[in-house]
Amino acid sequence: MAMKANPIRIVGCGPGSLEYVTPLAYKIAHEADVLVGAQRLLDLFPQTAAHYVPVSSPIEGLLDQLEKISPAKRIVILVTGDPGLLSLARLVIARFGRDACRVVAGVSSLQVAFAALGLDWHDAVVVDAHGDLPQLDDDAVVNAGKIAVYAGKKESFAWMASLARLLGSGYRVFLCADLTLPGETVREITVDNLLEEGHPSLSVVIFVKKELME
């Protein structure tokens, strides 16, 4: 890609609600010539003059499309949550180079979930089960005090039910779904609940040792 007059800005847009989009993110989005992101993120900025590019699979095709945009254009890529956590940012930086990108931090659903439970999360094990199911050694999780799993599909909840059985009765399990959105849910659940149908795709499940909740 030719050296751009403007860096690609990768902007964290929070867990869903416009209230969790930072003023800086809002400002940068409205300065864009080209605004890229999932449709629900583009919908947060309906009044910009930018050309909108919805993200779709395969991502390589999107990156090829961005590579053809004039270096003079200001490209802003909107990502959910924080760009440093399970984000499209990694693929963008890998393609265009760290020097060609600027990353703007956001609020992650992980932060919101732990805040809702009144817990810190600096020592939490974070697991991505939103896409492919994780391949974890038991040792990686079995003694962890806090485990946060990004869910998203029926198979990921079934995987978490197996994780709950592995961890045993010493843990409490919390479903944090649609965080900051009108249908937000934060509730304690059981293994049987994990196997129920219809969990929201925007879900984080937190496993916490019981003694940490006392």
Image (spheres, helix red, strand yellow):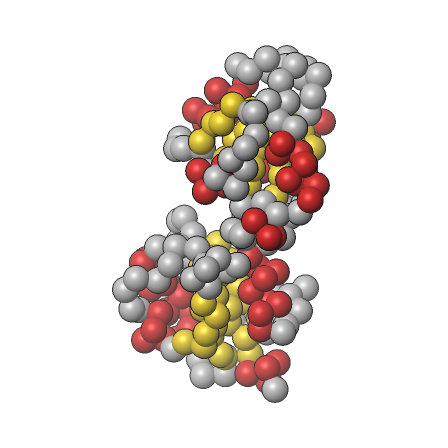
Residue 140 visible (yes or no)? no
- Residue 108, image x and y in percent? 59, 54
Front-most of 127 and 14? 14
Residue 184 visible (yes or no)? yes
Which residue sits at x=35%, y=62%?
199
- Residue 119, image x and y in percent? 63, 72
Front-most of 98 and 163? 98
Most extreme residue toward the left, as rendered? 197
Pick the quarter of the image with the N terminus: top right
- Residue 95, image x and y in percent? 57, 26
Which residue sits at x=58%, y=45%?
13
In this rendering, the count of numbered labels is 0
Residue 103: image quadrant is top right
Q: Determine whether 15 is above or below 51 in the image.
A: below
Position of 204 compared to 92: left or right? left
Front-most of 119 and 38? 38
Position of 121 compared to 169: left or right? right
Q: Determine whether 66 is above or below 84 in the image.
A: above
Which residue sits at x=53%, y=14%?
68
Position of 142 compared to 115: left or right? left
Residue 125: image quadrant is bottom right
Pick the quarter of the image with the C terminus: bottom right
Front-most of 187 and 44? 44
Q: Determine whether 22 is above or below 149 in the image.
A: above
Q: Determine whether 46 is above or below 18 in the image.
A: above
Which residue sits at x=32%, y=75%?
192
- Residue 52, image x and y in percent? 49, 27
